[in-house]
């Protein structure tokens, strides 16, 4: 975690770089106002829309348009140009987007007062984006910790429909859980929570309950699979292909709970993470997959701008400890 002195040095260096580029002018009385323009530029480049930027900054559309005009005059670049009914960034705007965002974050970190955290008086709503099963298995332990230490804190769990990190960057979501992949935004902070593996699940009394399940038995059944966006083949299909096998998917759903609900009242086979869905699989028959599929690490993800936030740090500790309580030391 960077110190306040380090953040100040970074901010000073960035300001000098922007002054040299003509983006801000700290040598005159308009310097502070020019720094405020950076916040507006950051939001405009993130939203790509004057109307949406105005709503985020709580300005009128006309005031936001005037701000964009000032930014164009200051930078000597149109920044956002119309393409049909939308605005698209110029090459200069694309170049500036990440740099402006970091500068604004450093400025906010320097100016944010550091206060001692009083959990009993803390009033705040945290939004956590998780996949099916996390709330059911880990949520009660998180709730017990939060209610016991910070009764004024409210938790809001939302479904994870995709792996886009934009909601973390924009502050819509405070914390997210998931498996880190190549497409995960590199600027996000990551802390491992627990290891998990895929298991097959069928209803009680299913024919597979009475046999030692081989890969051929698993592949021959009808499957319900979980896919958020595409029908791309995953590691299960690749492992089966190496054995000259393929599974038949008859239905695709968007979450683990839906897959298990369908398998519970049919002969479908669901394949889900074991630890993540412990309570969801109650009363069903689970079995290890008869094929070699890598385990996965479920992690906690958040945006670095919240690193120094004491309340956010406390919430992260609550989630990590809840995983240990709910899943056991071996799981985290």
Image (cartoon, rainbow, N blue to C red):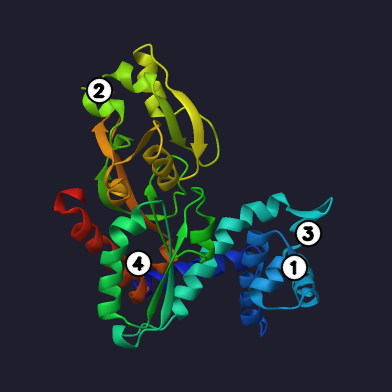
Q: Is residue 168 left or right of residue 20?
A: left
Q: Earlier in the sequence, mark 2 or mark 3?
A: 3
Question: Looking at the image, which is closer to me, 49 or 70?
Answer: 49
Q: Position of residue 250 (x, y in %)?
A: 50, 28
Asked if residue 150 is positioned above or below residue 229 in the image, the reply reads: below
Q: Which residue sits at x=50%, y=73%?
A: 107
Tell me: 28 left or right of 178: right
- Please tell me whether mark 2 or mark 1 is closer to you in this view: 2
SS of the residue under disc 3: loop
Foreground: disc 3 or disc 1:
1
Residue 64 image offset from top left, x and y in percent: 75, 73
The residue that disc 2 covers is 213
- Quadrant of res 109: bottom left
User: Does the residue at mark 3 contact the one at mark 1 (Cβ under 8 Å)?
Assistant: no
Q: Circle 1 is placed at which residue position?
A: 51
- N-terminal of the pair, mark 4 or mark 1, is 4
Distance from label 3 to label 4 (Cα)?
35 Å
Asked whether residue 25 appears in the rendered view, the answer is: no
Category of crowding for the residue at label 1, using alpha-carbon neighbours closer than 10 angstroms: few (below 14), some (14–19), many (at least 20): some
């Amino acid at each position: 975690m960077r110190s306040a002195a380090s953040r100040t040095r970074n901010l000073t260096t960035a300001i000098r770089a922007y002054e040299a580029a003509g983006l801000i002018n700290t040598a005159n009385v308009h310097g502070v106002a020019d720094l405020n323009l950076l916040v507006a530029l950051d939001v405009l480049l993130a939203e790509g829309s004057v109307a949406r930027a105005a709503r985020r900054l709580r300005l009128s559309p006309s005031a936001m348009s005037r701000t964009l005009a000032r930014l164009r005059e200051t930078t000597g670049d149109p920044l956002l140009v119309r393409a049909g009914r939308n605005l698209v960034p110029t090459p200069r705007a694309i170049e500036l987007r990440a740099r402006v965002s970091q500068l604004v974050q450093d400025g906010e970190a320097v100016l944010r007062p550091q206060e001692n955290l009083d959990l009993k008086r803390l009033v705040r709503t945290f939004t956590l984006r998780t996949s099916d099963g996390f709330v059911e298995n880990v949520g009660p332990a998180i709730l017990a910790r939060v209610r016991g230490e910070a009764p004024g804190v409210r938790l809001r769990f939302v479904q994870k429909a995709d792996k886009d990190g934009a909601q973390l960057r924009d502050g819509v979501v405070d914390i997210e859980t998931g498996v880190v992949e190549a497409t995960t935004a590199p600027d996000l902070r990551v802390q491992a929570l627990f290891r998990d593996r895929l298991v097959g699940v069928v209803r009680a009394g299913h024919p597979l309950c009475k046999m030692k399940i081989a890969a051929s038995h698993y592949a021959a059944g009808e499957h319900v699979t979980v896919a958020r966006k595409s029908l791309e083949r995953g590691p299960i299909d690749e492992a089966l292909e190496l054995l000259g096998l393929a599974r038949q998917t008859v239905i695709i759903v968007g979450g683990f709970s839906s897959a298990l609900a369908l398998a519970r009242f049919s002969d479908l086979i669901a394949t889900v993470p074991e630890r993540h869905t412990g309570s969801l699989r109650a009363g069903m028959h689970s079995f290890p997959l008869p094929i070699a599929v890598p385990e996965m690490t479920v992690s906690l993800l958040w945006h670095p701008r919240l690193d120094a936030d004491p309340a956010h740090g406390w919430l992260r500790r609550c989630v990590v400890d809840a995983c240990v309580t709910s899943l056991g030391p071996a799981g985290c």
